Image (cartoon, rainbow, N blue to C red):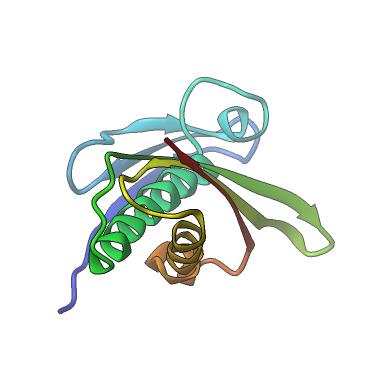
């Protein structure tokens, strides 16, 4: 099975004063603003790193749920936050790390199995496979 999803960006102007917009095929994002100020100065709008974080958190959560199901567990809830690190390097900027903070409520699972499955999801989700960044995970099993 092969699935293609699309997103698009429009940009006008130079790097610091220019403005852009990002849209997705689904319409969830429709001409959402982005620019230097939203990426580096906390301005209102989105930025590529925030979108990568959202994609990674969502992908990880789905992969974790799938792997739990394969082991006979059904989560009551999985909450994942992704922190994406953008750093200036000698050859320009790079996403160097993603840290996943996940909390989950899973009836009947022990801590060892929970951590095993969480780490498998961390390396196995498609977005993790896409990124060259160092990916770390803090996983908390809630009761």
Between 56 and 43, the one nearer to me in the picture: 56
Given the current orientation, which residue lies at the most extreme top position? 44
Residue drawn at x 51%, y 59% is: 115
Quick check: 125 left or right of 102? Answer: left
At which x and y percent is residue 81? 49, 39
At which x and y percent is residue 135? 61, 60
Residue 108 lies, with reference to residue 20, above or below; the image says below
At which x and y percent is residue 24? 26, 45
Q: How many marks?
A: 0
Residue drawn at x 27%, y 39% is: 76
At which x and y percent is residue 64? 36, 58
Which quadrant of the structure image shows residue 10? top left
Instruction: Assign the N terminus to one quadrant of the image.
Output: bottom left
Given the current orientation, which residue lies at the most extreme right position? 90
Residue drawn at x 42%, y 35% is: 143
Given the current orientation, which residue lies at the most extreme bottom position? 1
Residue drawn at x 50%, y 54% is: 111
Between 104 and 46, the one nearer to me in the picture: 104
Between 2 and 10, the one nearer to me in the picture: 2
């Amino acid at each position: 099975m092969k699935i293609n999803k699309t997103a698009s960006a429009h940009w006008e102007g130079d790097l610091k004063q220019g403005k852009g917009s990002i849209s997705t095929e689904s319409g969830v994002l429709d001409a959402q603003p982005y620019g230097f100020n939203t990426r580096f100065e906390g301005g209102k709008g989105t930025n590529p790193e925030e979108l990568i974080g959202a994609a990674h958190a969502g992908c990880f959560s789905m992969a974790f749920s799938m792997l739990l199901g394969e082991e006979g567990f059904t989560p009551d809830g999985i909450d994942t936050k992704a922190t994406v690190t953008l750093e200036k390097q000698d050859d320009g900027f790079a996403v160097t790390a993603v840290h996943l903070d996940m909390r989950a409520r899973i009836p009947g699972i022990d801590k060892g199995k929970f951590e095993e499955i969480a780490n498998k999801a961390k390396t196995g989700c498609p977005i993790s496979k896409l990124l060259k960044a160092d990916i770390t995970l803090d996983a908390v099993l809630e009761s």
